[in-house]
């Protein structure tokens, strides 16, 4: 019974926190922002060309590395990652200064074949079982992969995630690229464009074989 009471209290606290943050987000969105951010299509074109410049004049370059034992072509942000871990089963790229990461993992067994809608529900249910929360913002199905954009709470603020699963091949590769939600119009769009470019490169790589 004590466990049930604790879980109810946790959910009530989480609901109050979400309501408060939603109000703050609405307030910020109501304030005028004349910054001209790149659209996702513009960002994808910049990734293809190899460089992008943000409205604040920050410039980033892109490159491609071969990831995992499956030899997946993985576009990534060049010369910023301070923590890199790679082997046949995972590629982890983390930049603590900009608070962004790119992670790709080879799972032990093939993923469950299911629609993106069922994947979304399973992810949300899994977070609830861990006494956490995930709010899925968008679902996208591309030629070689599916991805969800979602927000999750942490002690340091909301995280903006792009979670993807590669359907092509052995159906064992998943990934999660993320940044803080406050940077979703810049770093978030850039990371999403990298996922879209990954989809293109898988197609290009298959066609070249």
Image (spheres, rainbow, N blue to C red):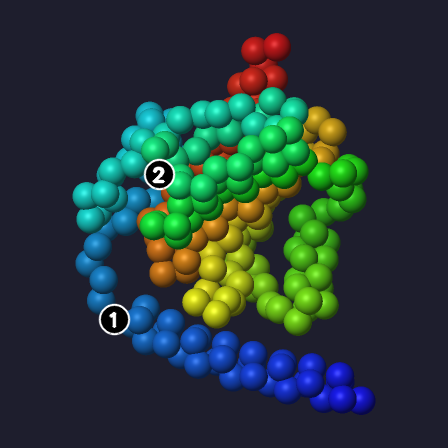
Distance in Å between CA atoms under marks 2 and 1: 32 Å
Q: Residue at 72% x, 57% y: name it.
A: 122
Rendering quarter of residue 7: bottom right
Q: Is residue 46 left or right of residue 56?
A: right
Q: Is residue 166 left or right of residue 93?
A: right
Q: Is residue 134 left or right of residue 4?
A: left
Q: Position of residue 187 (x, y in %)?
A: 37, 48
Q: Residues within 10 Å of mark 2 (few under 14, many from 20)?
A: some
Quadrant position of the N terminus in the picture: bottom right
Counting labels gives 2
**SS category of the residue bearing label 2:** loop
203 lies above or below 41 = above
First in residue order: circle 2 vs circle 1? 1
Q: Position of residue 186 (x, y in %)?
A: 33, 49
The circle drawn on residue 31 is 1
Mark 2, mark 1: which one is toward the viewer? 2
**SS category of the residue bearing label 1:** loop
The circle drawn on residue 140 is none
Quadrant position of the C terminus in the picture: top right
Q: Residue at 65% x, 33% y: name it.
A: 89
Residues 40 and 65: in front is 65
Q: Residues within 10 Å of mark 1 (few under 14, many from 20)?
A: few
Q: Position of residue 32 (x, y in %)?
A: 22, 67
Residues 112 and 73: in front is 73
Residues 54 and 8: in front is 8
Residue 10 visible (yes or no):
yes
Q: Residue at 43% x, 76% y: name it.
A: 21
Residue 41 visible (yes or no):
no
Q: Residue at 68% x, 67% y: name it.
A: 130
Mark 2 sits on what residue?
80
């Amino acid at each position: 019974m004590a466990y049930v009471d604790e879980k109810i209290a946790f959910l009530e606290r989480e609901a109050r926190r979400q309501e408060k943050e939603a109000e703050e987000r609405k307030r910020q969105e109501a304030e005028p922002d004349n910054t001209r951010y790149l659209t996702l299509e513009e960002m994808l074109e910049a990734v293809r060309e190899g460089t992008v410049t943000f409205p604040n004049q920050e410039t980033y370059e892109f490159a491609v590395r071969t990831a995992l034992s499956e030899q997946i072509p993985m576009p990534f942000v060049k010369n910023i990652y301070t923590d890199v871990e790679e082997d046949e089963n995972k590629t982890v790229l983390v930049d603590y200064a900009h608070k962004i990461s790119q992670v790709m993992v080879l799972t032990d067994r093939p993923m469950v074949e299911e629609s993106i809608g069922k994947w979304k529900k399973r992810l949300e249910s899994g977070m609830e079982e861990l006494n956490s929360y995930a709010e899925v913002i968008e679902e996208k199905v591309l030629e070689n992969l599916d991805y969800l954009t979602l927000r999750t709470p942490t002690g340091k603020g909301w995280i903006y995630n792009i979670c993807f699963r590669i359907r092509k091949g052995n159906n064992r590769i998943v990934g999660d690229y993320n940044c803080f939600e406050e940077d979703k119009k810049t770093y978030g769009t850039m990371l999403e464009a990298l996922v879209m470019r990954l989809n293109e490169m898988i197609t290009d790589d298959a066609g070249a074989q």
